[in-house]
Image: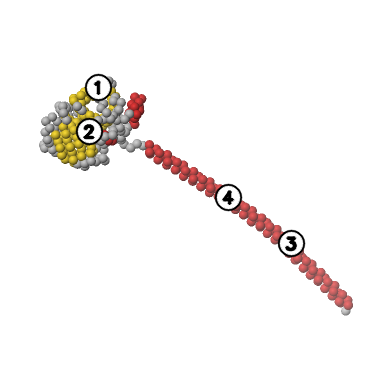
Amino acid sequence: MLERWTGLMGVRGGVLVALGLALAVPTAGCKKKAEDSEKDEKASKKKSSDDEETEKDSKKKKKSSDDEEDDKDTKKKTKKASDDEDDSKTAKKVKAPKNVDDDDDDDDDDDDDKNTKKKIKSLKPSKGDVDIVGSWTLSGKNDAGKKYKGTSKITKIGGSMFKATWTIGGEKQEGIIFKDGNVLSCGWSPKKDLGVIAYLVKPGMLDGVWFEEQHTSLGNEILKGPANKDALSGLYTISKGETPGDKKKYSGTVDITIYKSGVYKLTWKMGGQTMKGLGLRSHHFPGSDTDVLSAGFNDGGDAGVMQYIIYSDGTTMTGHWALPAKGGGEPGWGKETMVKKD
C-alpha cells in the first residue's frame, strides 16, 4: 500500500514535473513572445516614426515644391505685370494724331529750329505796336512733315493794312494782312481776287473787320449766332455789314463748319453772291492771349489763310496756315516761323 503510494507519488511527481515543465514551457514561450511582441512593437513604432518622418519630409518637399511653384507663378505674374506696365508705357508713348491747333515739337528737328523754339518760349506775345514792315526769313513744315524755307517781304498799305510776298523754292505767293495787336490775319491766293477778315470772338457774336486787295480802308461785319469759347460751328446772321470805302450796307448769312484738322470753313451768302474761305483761330495757338478767327476768302473758293502771333522782341513771329485741297475735302495746313532780317 505504501509502495503503491510511493509509486503513485512517483508517478504523480513525474506528472507534476511534466506538468511543471509543460507549464514552464508556455511561460517561457509567453515571455519570449512578449519580448518579441515588444520588439515588434518597438520596430512598428520605429517604422511608424520613420513613416511619419518620411511623410513629414514628403510634406516638406511637397510644400517646398508648392512654394517653388507659387514662387514661379508669382514671378510669372510679376513679369507679366512688368511687361504689361512696359506695354502700357509704350502705348503712352504713341502720339495721337495732330491737327493744326496742336503744338508740334517735331518742328524743331535741326539746330536752327531748336534755337528758334527756345527763343520763342522765352518771349511773350507783343503788347505794344510792332513794326512788321521789312524783310523776313521763314521756315515751316506742312501737314505731311515736309520742311521748307524761304523769305518774305511786307509793305504797308495804310493803317493796320499790309501787303506781303512770300518766296519759297523760287515760287512767289502774294497776300494781304490785317494787323490787330499781336495777331496778324492774312489772306492769300494764286489769284488776284482775294480778301481777308478778322473776327474777334465774343459770346454769341463775331465782331469783324475786312478788306480786299484793292481797298485802302476797312469794312465791318458783325455776325450773330452760336459763337462760344469751345466751338464756332453753326449758321450766323450778318447783323451789320459795311463795305470798305463807300460803307455800303449789306446783309446775309455765314455758315461756319470745322474740319477734323481744326481748320474752319466759311461760306457767305449775300443776296445772289456766294463767297468761300478758310479760317484759323488764335486762341488755340501757343502764345496768343486773344481769341481771333482769321479767314482768307474769295468767290472762287481757292483762298488760303495764314495767322501769325507777334512776339515782344519785335523780330519773331510764329504762325499757322491752311490752303484748300484740290477737289475739296480736308485742306492742307502747316506751321511757320518768321524772323526779321532788317
Q: Earlier in the sequence, mark 2 or mark 3?
A: 3
- x and y percentages locating residue 13 in the rendered image: 83, 71
Which type of secondary structure does the marked residue at label 2 adopt?
strand
Residue of label 4: 60
Q: Which of the labelled discs sits on residue 294, or is there none?
A: 2
Q: Are marks 1 and 3 in contact (CB under 8 Å)?
A: no
Q: Earlier in the sequence, mark 1 or mark 4?
A: 4
In the image, is 319 to the left or to the right of 275?
Answer: right
Q: Nearer the viewer, residue 209 or 15?
A: 209
- x and y percentages locating residue 202 in the rendered image: 23, 39
**Residue located farthest toward the front when viewing the structure as drawn:** 128
Q: Residue at x 53, y 49 (%)?
A: 66
In the image, is 3 to the left or to the right of 121?
Answer: right
Q: Earlier in the sequence, mark 3 or mark 4?
A: 3
Q: Residues within 10 Å of mark 4 (few under 14, many from 20)?
A: few
Which type of secondary structure does the marked residue at label 4 adopt?
helix
Q: Residue at x 21, y 35 (%)?
A: 199
Q: Residue at x 14, y 38 (%)?
A: 252
Residue of label 1: 134
Marks 1 and 4 sit apart, C-alpha to C-alpha, by 89 Å
Front position among marks 1 and 4: 1
Q: Are marks 2 and 1 in contact (CB under 8 Å)?
A: no
**Quick check: 245 above or below 4?**
above
- x and y percentages locating residue 27 in the rendered image: 75, 65
Front position among marks 4 and 2: 2
Marks 4 and 2 sit apart, C-alpha to C-alpha, by 80 Å
Front position among marks 2 and 1: 1
Residue type highlighted by circle 1: Gly
